[in-house]
Amino acid sequence: MKPYLDAVIVVEGKEDETLIKTFFECVIFKTNGYDIKDEDIKFLQLIEEKQRIILLLDPDKAGRDISKRIKDKLHNYEEIVVDIDKCNRGIKNGVAEYDIESLKETLSKYVGNKPRDTITKSELFDLGLLGDESKRKFVSEKLNLGGYKTNEFLKRINLLKVTFNQLKELLLEYGNQ
């Protein structure tokens, strides 16, 4: 069983996520490079109230620009600076090329106990949120989730520790529109 990282790890892309998830069970928040949206940064602001956020971005201009954009809006985060001298798995110098042992050592201090997800897919089904995109979109907008596609929605409500009863209350409000 892989160790669980007790933090939300912010990375730039899929290759970074794949490398980290090879060795750790964790929640990854991808910025998609420069494409990070303002609504995603607002969502990170909500997350920082409930969970530790770790910025793990490439040490290049793009990574520094993304980091600055995020750090200008967040107050409670930690940043891991990738040591360029330890990037030895390709021609680029980024997270995906980081020396595996160095990466594991760097992230190992964030290992903790995995919490039970607040909401499951079957609970979304029970609430009528699996098959009804308009309901998910309503809840997403009310909670500033920035996403309402099923898997992203589920991930984000769990990151914010939204309860079953909170969802029920929001759905009552949806029904009263």
Image: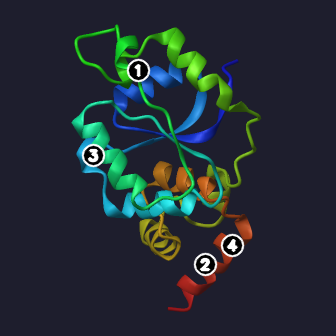
**Amino acid type, residue under disc 4 in the picture:** Gln
Residue 169's spot in the image, x, y percent? 67, 79
Q: Residues within 10 Å of mark 3 (few under 14, many from 20)?
A: some
Kindly state the secondary structure of the residue where label 1 is placed. loop
The colour scheme is: rainbow
Mark 4 is surrounded, within 10 Å at the Cα level, by few (under 14), some (14 to 19) or many (20 or more) other residues, namely: few
- Circle 2 residue: 170
Q: Secondary structure at mark 3?
A: helix
Q: Are marks 3 and 2 in contact (CB under 8 Å)?
A: no
Q: CA distance from mark 1 to mark 2?
A: 45 Å
Inter-mark Cα distance, 1 to 3 = 17 Å
Circle nearer the N terminus (1, 3): 3
The single residue placed furthest to the bottom in the displayed view is: 177
Residue 150's spot in the image, x, y percent? 48, 53
Residue beneath label 4, please? 166
Do residues under tags 1 and 3 come within 8 Å of each other at their CB atoms?
no
Q: Which residue sits at x=60%, y=53%?
A: 159
Residue at the (64%, 70%) spot, across then down:
167
Q: Which residue is mark 3?
A: 65
Element on which disc 4 rests: helix
Q: Which mark is residue 83?
A: 1
Residue flagged by tag 2: what amino acid is it? Answer: Leu
Earlier in the chain: of badge 1 and badge 4, it is 1
Q: Is any part of residue 147 visible from this angle?
A: no
Earlier-in-chain disc, 3 versus 2? 3
Q: Could you tell me the amino acid type at mark 3?
A: Asp
Q: CA distance from mark 1 to mark 4?
A: 43 Å
Circle 4/circle 2 CB separation < 8 Å: yes
Q: Position of residue 96 (x, y in %)?
A: 36, 21
Residue at 68%, 55% in the rendered image: 119
Q: Residue at x 43, y 65 (%)?
A: 133
Q: Is residue 60 above or below residue 133?
A: above
